[in-house]
Amino acid sequence: MCKQGAAGTTEYDRRTRASCRAYPYTCTSGDTVSGRPGKLADARAFREGKAPIRERITCTPQEVRHATIRMIQVLASYGLSVEDCVRAEVVLAEVMNNVTEHAFRCRLPGFLSVSILRDGRSLCVTVEDNGAPMPGNCLPQGHPQDLTVDLGDLPEGGFGWYLIRELTEDLCYQRRNEVNLLTFRLTTAEEW
Amino acid sequence: MDFETRQSGGTLQIDVLASRIDAACAIQFKDRMRELCAGGPARVILNLQRVDFLDSSGLGAVVAAMKYLGCDRSMELAGLTPKVRKVFRLTRMDSVFTIHASVEEAFGNGSSVA
């Protein structure tokens, strides 16, 4: 069974929808806007949890790189600690790369949007894309890799979901109206 | 993707000059590492001092480079910056590689590490 697929049934899901209702649905298959920098909320509105940081990109590794850098620069300028920025950077890059590599494998161009809304000590992140659904409509488990193997058998992949699961809370995947919707929280280690 | 190499005795030092090893350059990184390591000394030190960020694709590319060297040669890492170190630690890949704080330390301890 897929616990992540149990949309709309958890307290987190209700809270996420309430706190993230500022996110408009922006990622449609007919959309042609591509690769522009996201509209950035000002620092005060963001810190008060009233406006999200947003990015919307075409799904290429280069766009993922640039969007990751932009979002982390904004979060840092809004006062997020270095340690929390590191966690956010790893997670955002992994999540967006996963969409780029898997959801749009056979269909280009794809688009994805990321919204980050502050909710107290958490960053409430929503990632939407119009690519293929997760296999079985379920998130990969992301088990730690077995490293007690011969050199030639060391894994060269499969680290992404493990990192995402290690660094996030309340990870939730839904497939809704041909859209992949991934939500999670990054709980900040430090007050800010 | 730029690298600098220098050879000293039985050691090849490869400095990665890029600030990120991520999905956008992981394949290029793997290809270039193969070229740089081909036919070289048994010991390779990969200096990551200037690499600010490495994602899971970049990590896989570093592992692939080590595997390419095979059992008769070794690849050690040096100069991991905080984000890079965190990814190695979280994935427990820090248990697979010999990691030096700096290139200087790698050379200073050269005779004692595998």
Image (spheres, coloured by chain):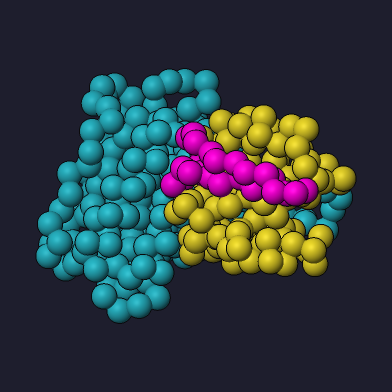
Front residue of this view, candidates A60 and B65: B65
Q: Is residue A75 left or right of residue B53?
A: left
**At which x and y percent is residue A82?**
36, 68
Above-or-below relation of A53 to A120: above
User: Quadrant where the C terminus of chain A lies?
Assistant: bottom left
**At which x and y percent is residue B4?**
55, 41
- Tally the numbered discs: 0
Residue at (72, 58) in percent of width and height: B97
What's the colour of chain A in the image? cyan
Residue at (54, 63) in percent of width and height: B86
Residue at (29, 67) in percent of width and height: A80
**At which x and y percent is residue A186?**
40, 64
Q: Quadrant of residue B62?
A: top right
Q: Is residue B29 left or right of residue A42?
A: right
What's the colour of chain B in the image? yellow
> Residue placed farthest to the bottom in the image?
A191
Q: Is residue A6 left or right of residue B45?
A: left
Front residue of this view, candidates B12 and A101: B12
| Residue B95 showing in the rendered view | no
Q: Is B4 colored magenta in this rendering?
A: yes
Q: Which residues are magenta?
A: B1-24
**At which x and y percent is residue B42?**
80, 45
Front residue of this view, candidates A184 and A192: A192
Q: Quadrant of residue A179?
A: top left
Front residue of this view, candidates A163 and B11: B11
| Residue B46 showing in the rendered view | yes
Q: Is residue A33 left or right of residue A85?
A: left
